Image (cartoon, rainbow, N blue to C red):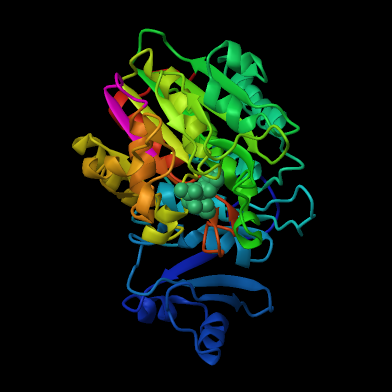
Amino acid sequence: MTETATGAAGPVIPVHLVSEATWPDVRASLPSVARAFAEASAFQPKSGRLALLPGASGMLEAVLLGCGEDEGLAETPFLLGKLATDLPAGRYAIAGPLAQPEIAYLGFLLGGYRFDRFKNAESRAVELAPPPGIDAAAMALVADAVREGRDLINSPANALNTAELAGAARALAARHGASLSEIAGDDLLRENFPLIHAVGRAAGGPPRLVDFVWGDPAAPKVTLVGKGVVFDTGGLNLKPDNSMLLMRKDMGGAAAALTAAAILMGLGARIRLRVLLPIVENAVSGNAFRPGDIYRARNGTTVEIGNTDAEGRLVLADALALADEETPALLVDFATLTGAARVALGPDLPPFFTNDDSLAADLARIGAQIADPVWRLPLWKPYRAMLDSKFADLNNVGSGGFAGAITAALFLANFVKNAKTYLHLDIFGWNPTAKPARPEGGEPQAARLIAATIIERYGKNSTNG
Ligand code: BES
Ligand code: MN
Ligand code: ZN
């Protein structure tokens, strides 16, 4: 009997990963009572099948987790998330070797998440010994960053208004010694953020732009921008009931940017990080912005409002223009920008847009490795004409109703001129159904991917920041 570092009492129960190929050997190696029970209950090593096996005294002696043909969980490292939700309280250890032990362990940690702000969930003390040789502290840091991102997305808009979302950014910046500034309400007009102001001015909570900076000023400049719409009614182009129901998640881009920033700062990435969050509520009132209004954006572009529900690209336009003024090496935005992205690729696979082919290849490769997948869509220049306006430089929606995710990306690209590389991620920000390590609800998609990609490109400081 071994004891884990946490010192809780009780035996450490082995969890055997069983594939079709290894099942005969694992079965033969089980103690006789456990083996008899597995056979009597007709356990099959199909992916995701879980069996709790008793010993002679009737106590839990071993666990089987079926993994189909995927022994070692090379393709499905997040399957271990199932252990966090399905096992009784206790201490466990994986018996065999894992193909990607860090990601598998992270999957276990992410599987244990619950949104318990308004409902006390039964707490399950399921502990898994970190697989040998991994940086368990780094994985705990990543899991905490994702947990905070999920909490922000899951929080309803009456519990997370514009001030409270800005407060979450402030708390994160303070924890890492980043310096933060904030522009709110009518100051946005004085400081030349006309679009952020126009979208957010109708709401009870004033619009804001949060800006924080961390790291060595001489290191490469990396800027993350996140769409922070705490609730999207659609504005005067009001969304119908079903489409509005989930719109508390419309700050998922800001949550993802904060999650990525938490990982980058926590692991000490060798960059000068900047985070910009335009934070608004797209609400309806007498002073709401209107279809047909024309505004001059921060960078001078005039924009005709074709639809007040295409608000995300408006607030991002001003934030991207500000980011672009200092010519960052890498400029990334995260946004729950279009329903069209979900129509194209579904909720689990966010599209991304960039002109940098080598970055695109890195994202595809790293996303697959760390179970944070994305798929490239084109910045197809000929579709730029769909955004033409008779009265302004640009319309905020594309005509014809085609290629909505692409025209949205082309709209944003209009506000980025200097950044060496620009990347736009159109995330869904939500798991519609629970899967291992991905509980139903808010998900700061692509945050881990962007942090990992940046660390691969620019490296880490020798001491953590
Ligand atoms: N926040 C929505 C996009 C969205 C909707 C994301 C549903 C995920 C699920 C965004 O502000 C929006 O309303 N976009 C419109 C744009 C349209 C008016 C051109 C859309 O996608 O319908
Ligand atoms: Mn909208
Ligand atoms: Zn929106």
Q: Which residue is drawn at 51% across and 83% down?
A: 35
Query: Residue pushed farthest left?
Result: 357
Q: Which image quadrant shows ligand 3?
A: top right
Residue 258 magenta-highlighted: no
Regarding residue 100, the answer to whether it shows in the image is: no
Q: Height in image: 337 above or below 70?
A: above
Q: Position of residue 329 (x, y in %)?
A: 31, 20
Q: Quadrant of the N terminus?
A: bottom right
**Residue 366, image quadrant:** top left
294 or 115: which is nearer to us?
A: 294
The residue drawn where x is 50% and y is 76% is: 49
Q: Is residue 39 visible in this depiction of the protein?
A: yes
**Prevailing secondary structure of the magenta residues:** loop
Q: Which of 30 and 78 is in front in this view?
A: 78
Q: From the viewer's perspective, is 87 left or right of 332?
A: right
Question: Which residue: 37% across, 36% down?
Answer: 390
Residue 418 in the magenta stretch? The answer is: yes
Q: Is residue 87 left or right of residue 405?
A: right
Q: Position of residue 250 (x, y in %)?
A: 58, 44
The magenta segment is: 415-424
Q: In which quarter of the image is residue 349?
A: bottom left
